[in-house]
Amino acid sequence: MAQYRVGRLQQEIQREVDDILLKRVRDPRVQGVTITGVKATGDLQQATIFYSILSDEEADKENVQKGLDKATGLIRGELGHRLSIYVTPEIHFELDKSIQYGSKIDELINKLKREQ
């Protein structure tokens, strides 16, 4: 039962944070951020929100992270109003590296195909 609740909460957080970033956060640094997943602890006290951006530039990654860190309070407060849970989890944003990893693998496969 608890596992189902964590999974459902993770989906709700992902959907709501996506919406909050789109409609409430005015920081230009977080424009174009895509929420790719949420991992909440079993006790629902903490949630890591994974995101991706289109740029591979290190400076862009840092700017986006700073923008998200600055907006964390607003986002958490907004989540508190939108979710029907007793305690809003502490949230932390983390760049989702799996998308970049997948792109790198695709690149390597294509390179191998060209060489054959």
Image: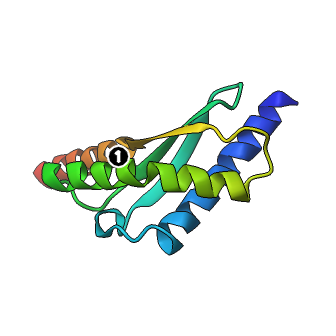
Q: Which residue is mark 1?
A: 102
Relative to residue 34, is residue 111 drawn left or right?
A: left
Residue at coordinates 66% horizontally, 44% vertically from top-left? 10
Mark 1 nearby-residue class (10 Å; few <14, some 14–19, many ≥20): few
Q: List x then y, in percent, for residue 51.
A: 42, 51
Residue at coordinates 55% horizontally, 65% vertically from top-left? 20
Q: Looking at the image, which is closer to me, 32 or 105? A: 32
Identify the image's colour scheme: rainbow, by chain, secondary structure or one colour. Answer: rainbow
Q: Quadrant of residue 31?
A: bottom left
Residue 14 showing in the rendered view = no
Residue at coordinates 56% horizontally, 58% vertically from top-left? 17
Question: In which quadrant is the N terminus drawn?
Answer: top right
Q: Looking at the image, which is closer to me, 58 or 65? A: 65
Instruction: Count all numbered tags in the image, as a single digit.
Output: 1
Q: List x then y, in percent, for residue 29.
A: 29, 63
Q: Residue furthest bottom?
A: 23
Residue 88 showing in the rendered view = yes
Q: Under tag 1, what secondary structure?
A: helix
Q: Residue furthest right?
A: 1
Relative to residue 82, is residue 98 drawn left or right?
A: left
Relative to residue 94, is residue 20 drawn left or right?
A: right
Q: Quadrant of residue 27?
A: bottom left
Type of amino acid under label 1: Gly
User: Is 31 located above or below residue 79 in the figure?
Assistant: below
Q: List x then y, in percent, for residue 67.
A: 32, 55
Residue at coordinates 23% horizontally, 54% vertically from top-left? 63
